[in-house]
Image (cartoon, rainbow, N blue to C red):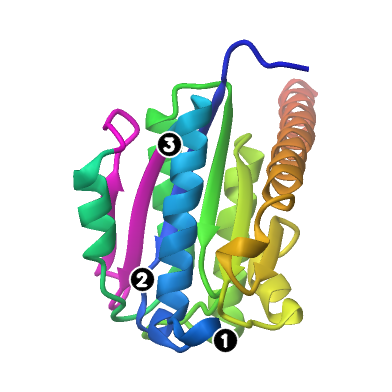
């Protein structure tokens, strides 16, 4: 079916932590692969008429989580955006949960559509001072769960990093995710992943709303008993 009116907003959240400077396939770094993916997806979605925003993130401790704007929803996709994207340099660490929560806020505040998707481009290595191992992984999963309960689709892509699927699952949990060697492997994969992420978020939100109504009813009955 031909969609006559686009109603999708996508916020791309690009990991520019130091681990992205590691080598990837074809003599390019992980950052170069993921930056290329961000540019390709932003252009494709923009050409389809979707609302697109692009931000990059890294961190240096809990009080220094940096989320850098490359393209806001209301900005044109032009040479200035390309210049900002090309000027990104991987550095510091990856407080992934905090970046996801901030991206969730930006998407809710500026998406302006009924369907909204948070797309995280990262090697899935959640690490910062005091933010590592099981704690970092659990916080990232929790942040994604919070976003999905609010009705946002969440898709996590690892491009060029070679991260093991089991490691990605520990970080991204039940959110839609995939690992691909290069951007060239995305055609035919992204569409189904987008749809799966949006369907899952809608189901999560309905479940959360039912649970909230049940809790409210039980609390009301307790008070009036």
Residue positioned 63% across, 10% down in the render = 4
Secondary structure at badge 1 equals helix
Position of residue 105 measured from the top left corner of the image (x, y, whole percent): 41, 41
Q: Is residue 1 left or right of residue 39?
A: right
Q: Nearer the viewer, mark 2 or mark 1?
A: 2
Residue positioned 73% across, 39% down in the render = 195
As drawn, the label of residue 211 is: none
Q: Which residue is mark 2?
A: 16
Position of residue 2 measured from the top left corner of the image (x, y, whole percent): 71, 16
Q: Nearer the viewer, mark 1 or mark 3?
A: 3
Position of residue 24 measured from the top left corner of the image (x, y, whole percent): 52, 84
Does label 2 or label 1 sit earlier along the sequence? 2
Q: Depth check: 201 or 76 in front?
A: 76
Q: Which residues are magenta?
A: 52-77
Q: Tell me where residue 8 sits by quadrant.
A: top right
Residue positioned 44% across, 81% down in the render = 28
Secondary structure at badge 2 equals loop
Secondary structure at badge 3 equals strand
Residue positioned 53% across, 46% down in the render = 118
Q: Quadrant of the N terminus?
A: top right
Does label 1 or label 3 sit earlier along the sequence? 3
Q: Which residue is mark 3?
A: 52
CA neighbours of label 2 inside 10 A, class few (<14), some (14 to 19), many (20+): many
Decide: is 208 above or below 18: above
Q: Which residue is mark 1?
A: 133
């Amino acid at each position: 079916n031909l969609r006559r009116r686009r109603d999708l907003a996508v916020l791309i959240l690009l990991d520019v932590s130091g681990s992205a400077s590691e080598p990837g396939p074809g003599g390019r770094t992980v950052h170069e692969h993921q930056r290329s993916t961000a540019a390709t997806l932003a252009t494709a979605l923009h050409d389809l008429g979707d609302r697109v925003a692009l931000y990059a993130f890294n961190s240096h401790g809990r009080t220094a989580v940096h989320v850098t704007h490359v393209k806001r929803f209301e900005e044109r996709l032009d040479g200035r955006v390309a210049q900002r994207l090309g000027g990104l340099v991987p550095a510091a660490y990856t407080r992934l949960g905090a970046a996801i929560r901030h991206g969730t806020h930006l998407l809710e505040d500026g998406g302006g559509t009924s369907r909204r998707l948070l797309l995280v481009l990262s090697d899935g290595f959640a690490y910062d001072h005091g933010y590592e191992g099981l704690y970092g992984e659990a916080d990232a999963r929790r942040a994604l769960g919070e976003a999905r309960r609010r009705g946002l689709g969440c898709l996590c892509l690892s491009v060029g990093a070679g991260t093991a699927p089991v490691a990605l699952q520990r970080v991204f949990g039940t959110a839609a995710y995939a690992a691909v060697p290069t951007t060239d492997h995305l055609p035919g994969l992204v569409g189904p992943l987008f749809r799966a992420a949006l369907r899952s978020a809608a189901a999560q939100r309905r479940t959360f709303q039912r649970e909230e109504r049940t809790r409210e009813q039980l609390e009301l009955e307790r008070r009036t008993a």
